[in-house]
Amino acid sequence: MPTQTTETPPPAVAAPAPAPAAALAPQPFAAPAAARLATELIADGALSLPLRVDGAVDWRAAAAALDLAAAGSIAVAAALADHYLAVAAVAIHGDADQRAEAIATGAAGHALAIPVAPPGHAAGEPQLLDGQLSGEGLAIPPELPLGTLLVRAQDERGERVALLLDAAAPGVRIADGRVDLAAVPVGDAELLPRWSEERLLGASALLHAAVSVGATIALLEDGARFAATQGQPWAGRTYASLIHDPHVIRGFGHSRAHAHAARAALDRAVEAAEAADAVHAALAAQALAADVAVAVGALLPELLGPTAAELEPLWTRLRALRAHTLRDPISWRHYSVGQQLLAADWSEPGLDPATPLPPAAPADGSVRTIESDAEAIAVARAYAAAIAPGAGVRDRDRSHGWEELALLGRSGLLGITVPAEYGGLDARQATIAEVVRLVGAADGSISQILQPHFGALEAILTAGTEAQRRFFFRQALSGRRFGNANGERGTKAAGDITTRLVPTLTGSYRVEGTKFYCTGSLSADWIAVTARDPAGNRSSALVQRDAANLELVDDWSGIGQRTTASGTTRLDGVEVQELHVLAQWRMAEGAHVSGAKSNLVHAAVNVGIGFGALAAGREYVLTRSRPSKDLGLESVLEDPHLVQRFGALHAKQQSAHALLLRAAELIGAAIDDPSPAVVSAATLAVAEAEAYGGDVALEVGSEVFALAGASASRSEVGLDRHWRDVRVHTLHDPAVWKFFQAGDALLSGAQYFGNRRNVI
């Protein structure tokens, strides 16, 4: 069961007063002239990208250049994307001389372009007959100076070929974005040795996703500057300024989280492209980027207040962004992703299903020592595979899975966060998130049980003495697990603590109080009990489960996460030694990432449950769903709406995963550099990942019923388990306040450490 938030959200009125209007440029949202931007890009060497001398494509550099260009002009960025696509085509299909020609063209400040037939073009594609190339009325981007054409044509055999032509070759006429080819003589030197449209599909999707993402984030940042300096509140609102309106703040945060999810998905697609596995991730990234662009474009004018209606530069940029998202039908991008997902041989991107998994735990009953991050992820996959088959039955019967939890203890996963100097793995944050996600996809309750365990180890690391670290880290490495006892009923606010530590004459303490929402405590070896010490400071008493005067009551009755081994904990004078009491109040001092680490696990639980819901829905559709008799289909896989919707959900789920890993990377950066700005960036990234991932999982958990059909709603199918689990878990921290934090930081520059707000 979710633990309770210990800090109250910041008030909506905490935003700073707006800056003077003179601080903003006279024309907000005005972009530089396209010609000037194109000249600057050429001067900066943008056309020399992305083809390297060795013939490989530098996708990362290309995406970065498009991101920068899109902030200035979407039309110029789209033209640059087409140039990069042509360069990529030469890299993939051309020979060494043609690649050298492409490199020389870019170095000279000229672009490559792929002429296309505009909509409704009657003449059709160019024809290559008897060594002459002919075609008319083809369109090219006019924003960049042209040096070379990559022309796709049909030869006399009816096959698709591609040719590389000098833009100044005889018979080539170019004017006002139009290309006419009048019997252009060509030979083998111009003909690319091979050609495949399919191989360019992923490249095109990736490049134009970068344009959409860059333009969307730039618009959002410009909107935030306008709102903070010139935005006027809506009539009837009593806020001092537009950025004091909590709905505006949350709206900006919601948009920012979605834009960051699109960027994270793009980064994932770039990584896949560099591994020559681009198509699936790129199509998903382009579809999501377009969806986010459309959503942000629809919401942004409302967030900017009534004066937005008069901002013509804003509407010009919004129209350009919307037009760019229409160059490829997004519904068909979703459909393509759905086709891949629903293919019988589909496997998770980057995972080789032929690679055998290690055993979930040693066969001799000992506790595994995990020695690498890769091993931790492999063990998590094996453990998830071992516990998944019985998850539905455990949920139905409210069984706490004693065997599965014992297996977890022997797997070695409980010790992966222990620092290396104490014998642990000191796993990367991305590894921890991935371990929790994998377990969550199999069983959302057991993944939640990992949260208080890792949280207790973080408290020991941050607030414990050297003796406490040595003792309790050995416990974790021995397979012993920590639960928690934080929340209390009947207090004024969630997070209020009435449980007390009472000192004894022998130097120990007695713990007095009653707790609820005690995640994992019924089956844990140690229970971290939050209490006030004699001075009123927040402390944590680590109590053994079999301690005298400790009563654990199995009364958790939530609709989801039914088997988290939560319930009531009664402590009637439970004695604890001083070694077992942590000065938890120290964790509230200064800027640190402990809160972000804790919430990263919560975010991973959300994302994992979403993956589990989508996988369960996919399995049901492939094995049990039937088409409606009125559709006349042989299989549900012939239903384009079903396939398209699966693709859209999968794209969102993949972006939630990418956003989770982005947050983990930023925590890692904050561990290396614990300055307030870096810690706040990590905290906000985790907040976005948790809220966005929760929203996506809720959508997936609900939508799979519409895709699977009426028979999937039967209780014995258990498809509702995933939605119930994530619905309960997302109540841990209301997503609205996570989005609020992100929006507050964007609009006011506030920093966050956990749920604590700091204005700089």
Image (cartoon, rainbow, N blue to C red):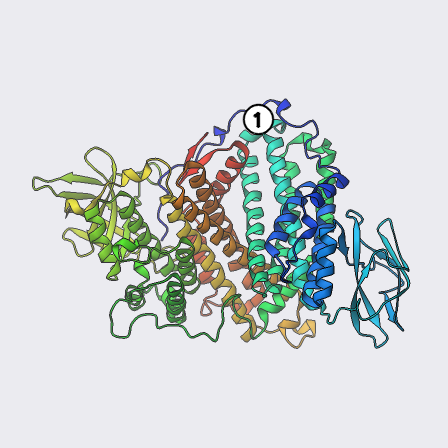
In the image: residue 62, left or right of residue 750: right
Q: Nearer the viewer, residue 700 or 222?
A: 222
Q: Secondary structure at mark 1?
A: loop
| Residue furthest left in the image | 505
**Residue 111 appears in the rendering:** yes
The residue singled out by tag 1 in the image is 241
Q: Nearer the viewer, residue 514 or 175?
A: 175
Instruction: Identify the residue at horizontal 22%, vertical 53% (top origin).
Output: 472
Tell me where residue 380 appears, x and y as whole percent.
Answer: 38, 65
Residue 745, position as x, y percentages in the image: 50, 36
User: In this picture, is 286 found above or below 246?
Assistant: below
Does the image show residue 393?
no
Amino acid type at circle 1 is Ser
Q: Report whether 482 appears left or right of 192.
A: left
Q: Provide residue 26's location: percent of width, then percent of height.
A: 69, 26
At 22% from the left and 57% from the top, the residue drawn is 474
**Occupied quadrant, residue 27:** top right
Q: Residue at x 7, y 39 (%)?
A: 505
Q: How many marks?
A: 1
Q: Is residue 50 above or below residue 635?
A: above
Compare residues 96 and 674 and report the one nearer the observer: 96
Q: Residues within 10 Å of mark 1 (few under 14, many from 20)?
A: many
Q: Position of residue 636 (x, y in %)?
A: 62, 72
